[in-house]
Amino acid sequence: MPYNADKKRYDKLTYRRCGNSGLLLPPITLGLWHNFGNDKSKKSMSIEAKKMLFRAFDRGVTHFDLANNYGPPAGSAEENFGKVIKSDFKKYRDEMIISTKAGYHMWDGPYGEWGSKKYLTASLDQSLKRMNLEYVDIFYSHRFDPLTPLEETADALVQSIKSGKALYVGISSYSSKQTIKMNKLLKERGVSCLIHQPSYSMINRWVEKDLLSTLKKLGIGCIAFSPLAQGMLSGKYLKKIPKVSRISDNSSLDKNMITKSYLFKIKELTKIANKRGQTLPQMALSWILRHPTMTSALIGARTVKQLDECLDSQNNLTFSNSELKEIDKYAKEEKINLWVKSSTD
């Protein structure tokens, strides 16, 4: 059966303006970092992953976030998304915001990672081919490169727009200082930095020091990735490490992150969430979106059920002052920022 989107998909959602731009994004964005690569039994995404894409769009999620190295294996998430574009989403392309990134290791040799013009340009061409697209809506520098002149990375981002291969450009995991520099360089070249994608969650709050205020001042949008701390802001690790989890997969979490301090915080935050009529993941997302300058929260999901739970967080986005004070007692750093090197250079 060919996919036909729900005709009422735009009825309930309030979209958010991205910085000072004319672009509106959904409060929740679906990311394809994990779970959209190749199924172990065949060279395609799982049936559940495809259902998540359809369900997200049916619920008004217009933004799908990818990167060149998403999978696993690297590149397969884009390839699989491209197959869905070709088979089902093509007629809805103008209703979608599709982003990709380049910065991390993608292929062997000296030109397969970081921030050179050579790498970023080649990577974008490859991404477009994998996704069966003529252009992406947003192209990101995925991480700050301390060894490449920022001017060169800016030139590559500007070229992506002038060549018609991207409509907007953004940066990810840049410090406040480097964000200011990149914004200036792009402005000098006649291009605006649309959006910044930093990691941010209740137990990873580095952006609150100065990045959020910098983005507000510069008129740059913000989309927080890993708002659920890769599943750590749920109850899944309270009793034992599940067989189906990022720690068990040895993908991006370490079992040493499950400390007594962490478990205590999760138990207390769960109590607060329950009083609000939410699950902890729902409250964690609502908490991220409480910022008036926060454009979107970028989630991942393994199942349609998980996706729906996250999307239902939008039913309660307000917090009382007493709730925020209570949350702050337990929403403390847990040293889980895997991207700290990029954001402190």
Image: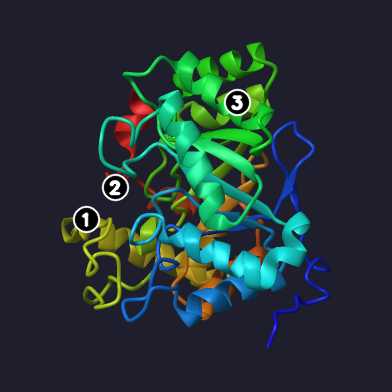
x, y (%) of residue 238? 28, 72
Please tell me how crowded label 3 is: few (under 14), some (14-19), or many (20+) other residues with Cα within 10 Å: some
Q: Amino acid at mark 2?
A: Ile
Q: Residues within 10 Å of mark 2 (few under 14, many from 20)?
A: some
Q: Quadrant of residue 196?
A: top right
Q: Which residue corresponds to mark 1? A: 257
CB under 8 Å between discs 2 and 1 = yes
Q: Residue furthest top?
A: 188
Q: What's the residue type where badge 3 is placed?
A: Gln
Whether residue 84 sits left or right of residue 120 in the image: it is right
- Residue 307 visible to an observer of this rendering: yes
Residue 211 horizontal/vertical position (percent): 50, 29
Of 36 and 324, nearer the camera is: 36
What residue did someone put label 3 on?
159
28 left or right of 109? right
Real-space Cα distance between discs 1 and 3? 41 Å
Q: Are marks 3 and 2 in contact (CB under 8 Å)?
A: no
Q: Is residue 142 above or below residue 334?
A: above
Direction from residue 20 to residue 28 in the image, left or right: left
SS label for mark 2: loop
Q: Quadrant of residue 44?
A: bottom left
Instruction: Point out the image quarter for the N terminus.
Output: bottom right
Disc 2 to disc 1, C-alpha distance: 7 Å
Q: Mark 1 vs mark 3: give the one in front.
A: 3
Residue 227: give x, y in percent of width and height.
Answer: 47, 53
Work out whether mark 3 precedes mark 2 in sequence or the reverse, and give the earlier one: 3
Please name the residue shown 82% across and 74% down the image.
8
Question: Mark 1 belongs to which amino acid?
Answer: Met
Q: Say which mark, if any, is on residue 336.
A: 2
The numbered mark, 2 or 1, whose residue comes first in the sequence reads 1
